[in-house]
Amino acid sequence: MLAYRSGIFPMADSREDPEIFWIEPRLRAVLPLDGFRMSRSLARTLRRGRFTVTCNAAFEEVMDACAAPRRVRPDDDAEGDGESGSWISHRIQASYENLHYLGHAHSIECWQQAPEGRRLVGGLYGVGFDRVFCGESMFSRVPDASKVALAWLVAALRRGGASLLDCQFITPHLASLGAVEMSQKRYLALLQAAQSSAPHSSVVPAAVSGAAVAVGEEDGTGAEAGREGGGGVLTLPEAFAALLEDAASAGLASSPGKCIAQALTQTS
């Protein structure tokens, strides 16, 4: 956790690699929470409720899927740079599973019904603290699954009062969804602000996000809306639960994706 708070993160050379090395890239990818790029097709997928979306329901399974070797093509609905293999070693996975047990690492899952029962078809996981969420990896077994998981993540972070979504490295897939690249120095400044008591609107300015509105100003889902008594931000599971409550209050308990699509379309 000290490493994440300092702007570095672990990787390994392969699934079986017993060693861990720490990365501090010269360029960093961030997805501004008011800059998520919602395509018409993704909005339609959310509204139609093609997937059942959950939070922290299958953390280990999500990690297994993210760590599985795969060849990622440029047009795949997944993250990656076209190389097979995995940087998530068994040692790294065990560490994240422990972080999850301690309440610091979280997952979002996308499910579809199959003849044998509910099937995990996409998801993501990462580490959360203060107003920061560091996305680690995501996977997709059917089209749009990882995009839907990311849309729910962005909506939950906005709802919970977060201000910084770290994507580590830019990829064509992330860029198509609104991610931007910046220097590590700029990222560290944003990271420090997101861990301080600085006003929420100062963390991701328009010069970074490309938008003129600070996170949450349009729809009231910024820092103050997400705080319990104004004392702090919600954790990802708490913010996810708040989204479901919002959907229920709007009469959309059976199709919460409509609320997600509506909230994110406003700033896309």
Image: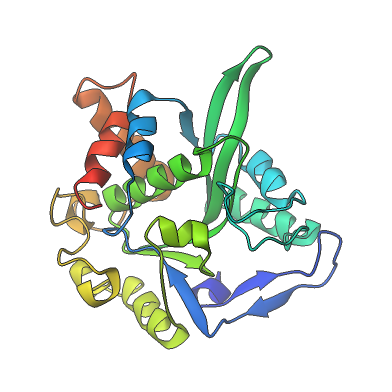
Residue placed at 30% from the left, 50% from the top? 160
Relative to residue 204, is residue 123 drawn left or right? right
Relative to residue 235, is residue 93 drawn left or right? right
Residue placed at 50% from the left, 81% from the top? 27
Q: Nearer the viewer, residue 26 or 194?
A: 26
Residue 258 sits in quarter = top left
Q: Nearer the viewer, residue 65 or 59?
A: 65
The x, y position of residue 155, in whole percent, is: 32, 46
Name above or below for residue 20 compared with residue 109: below
The x, y position of residue 203, in whole percent, is: 27, 73
Name above or below for residue 265 compared with residue 35: above
Residue placed at 70% from the left, 69% from the top? 11
Give the total of numbered labels.
Answer: 0
User: What colour scheme does the image use?
Assistant: rainbow
Q: Is residue 130 visible?
A: no
The x, y position of residue 30, in whole percent, is: 41, 68
Q: Nearer the viewer, residue 49 or 109?
A: 49
Which residue reaches farthest top?
Answer: 115
Name the quarter where the N terminus is drawn.
bottom right
Q: Is residue 18 visible?
A: yes
Name above or below for residue 5 compared with residue 66: below
Relative to residue 6, is residue 162 drawn left or right? left
Relative to residue 40, is residue 142 drawn left or right? right
The x, y position of residue 118, in whole percent, is: 60, 20
Residue placed at 26% from the left, 58% from the top? 34
Name above or below for residue 199 compared with residue 160: below
Residue 261 sits in quarter = top left
